[in-house]
C-alpha cells in the first residue's frame, strides 16, 4: 500500500512540474518517445533517431536511426507506435493520467510498445512488473478511452 501511495505522490508531483498535457500524444522534445527510434525498441536496443530520418504519423512527429527503420515504420505504423500515445503506461493504468516517460525505460509485451516514467528514484516499470501487467493493461486501456474522450 505504501508503494501505491508513493507512486501517486510522484505522479502528482510530476503534474506540478510538467502540468497536465492537453495533447493526446506525448511529443516531448518535439517528437514521440523524445526522438527515439520506435522500430529500434522492437530490436531490443532503443536508440535516438537522427534528424535526417523524420516522418509524421497522424500529425505526430517521429525520428528514426536509419532509412530502413523509417520505411519499416511507414509500412506498418500501428505495429510500432507506442501504447497510450507514448505516455507512461503505468500512470495511465493506475491514475488515468498522462505522465512523461524516460525513453530508455520500456517493455515490448504482446508485440506492443509500452513506455514508462523513470526519474527521481521512481521507476514505474519496476512497479508494473511487481503488479499484474495484464490487469494494468486492461485498466490503462479503459482509462485511455476516457482520456481520448476528454480531449
Image (cartoon, rainbow, N blue to C red):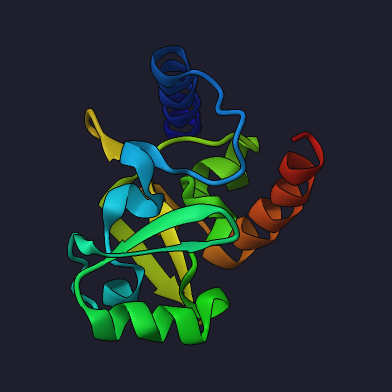
Q: Give the residue at x 37% y 67%.
A: 107
Outermost residue on the top side: it is 16
Towards the viewer: 14 or 64: 64
Residue 132: image location, x then y, percent: 54, 61
Does residue 65 lie above or below 72 as drawn?
above
Towards the viewer: 138 or 68: 68
Does residue 102 lie above or below 49 as drawn?
above
Q: Give the residue at x 28% y 53%.
A: 35
Residue 20 placement, left or right of 34: right
Q: Would you identify the image quadrant in which residue 55 lies?
A: bottom left
Residue 14: image location, x then y, percent: 41, 22
Q: Is residue 117 visible?
A: no
Q: Would you identify the image quadrant in which residue 61 lies?
A: bottom left
Q: Is residue 95 visible?
A: yes
Towards the viewer: 60 or 148: 60
Outermost residue on the front side: it is 52
Does residue 21 lie above or below 92 as drawn?
above
Q: Give the residue at x 47% y 43%.
A: 26
Residue 108: image location, x then y, percent: 40, 73
Towards the viewer: 28 or 123: 28
Q: Would you identify the image quadrant in which residue 39 lies?
A: bottom left
Residue 39 placement, left or right of 76: left
* Viewport quadrant of the C terminus: top right
Q: How many marks?
A: 0
Residue 34: image location, x then y, percent: 31, 47
Q: Give the residue at x 44% y 28%.
A: 2
Does residue 108 lie above or below 85 as drawn?
below
Amino acid at each position: 500500500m505504501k508503494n501505491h501511495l508513493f507512486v501517486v505522490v510522484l505522479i502528482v508531483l510530476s503534474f506540478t512540474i510538467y502540468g497536465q498535457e492537453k495533447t493526446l500524444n506525448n511529443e516531448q522534445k518535439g517528437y514521440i518517445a523524445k526522438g527515439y527510434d520506435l522500430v529500434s525498441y522492437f530490436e531490443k536496443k532503443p536508440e535516438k533517431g537522427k534528424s535526417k530520418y523524420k516522418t509524421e504519423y497522424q500529425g505526430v512527429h517521429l525520428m528514426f536511426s536509419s532509412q530502413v527503420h523509417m520505411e519499416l515504420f511507414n509500412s506498418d505504423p500501428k505495429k510500432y507506435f507506442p501504447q497510450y500515445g507514448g505516455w507512461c503506461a503505468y500512470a495511465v493504468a493506475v491514475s488515468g493520467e498522462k505522465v512523461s516517460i524516460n525513453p530508455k525505460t520500456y517493455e515490448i509485451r504482446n508485440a506492443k510498445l509500452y513506455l514508462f516514467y523513470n526519474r527521481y528514484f521512481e521507476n514505474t516499470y519496476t512497479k508494473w512488473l511487481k503488479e499484474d501487467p495484464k490487469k494494468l493493461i486492461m485498466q490503462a486501456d479503459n482509462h485511455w478511452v476516457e482520456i481520448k474522450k476528454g480531449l
